[in-house]
Image (spheres, rainbow, N blue to C red):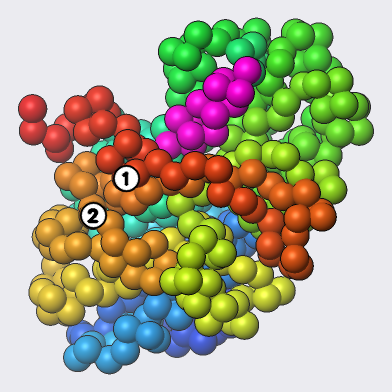
Amino acid sequence: MTELNRRHLLAAAAIGAGAGALPFRSARAQAANTIRIGVMNDQSGPYRDIGGPNGVTMAQIAAQEFGNRGFNVEVIGADHQNKPDVGANLARQWYDQGVDVILDVPTSSVGLAVNQVAREKNKVYINVGAATADLTGPQCSPVTAHWVYDTYMLAKSTGGAMVRAGGKRWFFITADYAFGHALERDTTNFVRAAGGSVAGSVRYPFPATTDFSSFLLQAQASRAEVIGLCNAGQDTINSIKQAAEFGLTRRGVKIAALLMFIADVHALGLEQGQGLVMTESFYWDLNDRTRAFSRRVQPRLNQRAMPNMVTAGNYSATLHYLKAVADMGAAAAKGPGVEVMNRMKAMPVEDEAFGRGTLRQDGRMMIPSYLFEVKKPSESTGPWDYLKLLQTTPADEAWRPLSEGGCPLVRS
């Protein structure tokens, strides 16, 4: 066994066991009616708190709640280290060893690499954590679905709101990989379409950057009214903290956190986060349904975190996939991935986290998006009570029109 094989299989067994899953065994030792779900994400880097171990746990919760429908379900997890080659190699190993579906895969460069392996192997891939809208555009695949958010939806909602509020002149600080590039591209299009302009941009090495001071000084020198952060996780937190240290917000510069999660607000604190706007497709306190769901799963999550749109997305995607397996039978679900994905697209999506949705021809999961503002400390009633709703965008308006994505699956 290669060192890569050994390291990732041991990591998978450890993470799976922590989530209550069965340990990973060789494909030959598995029963023919066992469906295997592999959750691949960042377990140790800047995106750990967005998905990480909690993402694996949420898939396991969905499998347990789905119950025994004539087949067994095994959930495993592993760390892709935010490296496309590691993610692609792990995907090949998993599919070859009998994993039936790969789930989550944040970091767009890794997500796109796994997308190609899934297409090659004709196996199901449900992306939850990566943001690039190219997964339902030029890189769309008949075996791939994209859950909960993407760069087009984020740019339209958060970017559009900032321009409407008077932020016409922008400067972008961008993580130098596929996600950052796509988010900058999509936001630039919305800013210019709304009559705004881009004063400049800078790209920084990902994931090796923690000091954003030189980039913030460039943004300040450009006299931009809005600094657009095309990053996520710990990078976003560090960027916002350092912007406050430089006094940029006190001088009237607005910070557009184009991808931000409730876990980031929790880490940042309301004192520094207040007034930021952010877009989500899920918030635990959105309505009675999301509150009941979140309070039920919260005790199972590390640090008793409330679920965010990625971890909730892992629950939703797992549940919908298992419904399709039950509908067609485990034996058929182990066959060509395109047939499983077609069955998923033919079935309505419905769960406690997101309510009702549909899976579009290009693989896009269609649900509303929500624009939130981070509360002032005086407005919060306690831990995780961080956001207030500003705007709801219906599903048919939130996402890029099917005709504009360039997906080769879409019939003209």
**Residue 199 appears at what percent x and percent y?**
65, 8
Residue 304 in sight in this render: yes
- Pick whichever, 253 or 323, lies toward us: 253
Which quadrant of the structure image shows residue 124?
Answer: bottom left
Answer whether residue 155 is magenta in the image: yes
- Quadrant of the image containing the C terminus: top left
Answer whether residue 307 is magenta in the image: no
Q: Are marks 2 and 1 in contact (CB under 8 Å)?
A: yes
The residue tagged 1 is 395
Image point (75%, 65%), residue name: 381
**Residue 88 appears at what percent x and percent y?**
42, 50
| Earlier sequence position, callout 2 versus callout 1 | 2
Q: Secondary structure at mark 2?
A: strand
Q: Secondary structure at mark 1?
A: helix
Q: Is residue 92 above or below residue 53?
A: above
Q: Is residue 395 above or below residue 191?
A: below
Image point (30%, 51%), residue name: 365
Q: Residues within 10 Å of mark 2 (few under 14, many from 20)?
A: some
- Secondary structure character of the magenta stretch overall: helix
The residue tagged 2 is 358
**Residue 18 appears at what percent x and percent y?**
58, 82
Q: Residue furthest front?
A: 379
Q: What segment carries the magenta color?
A: 153-166
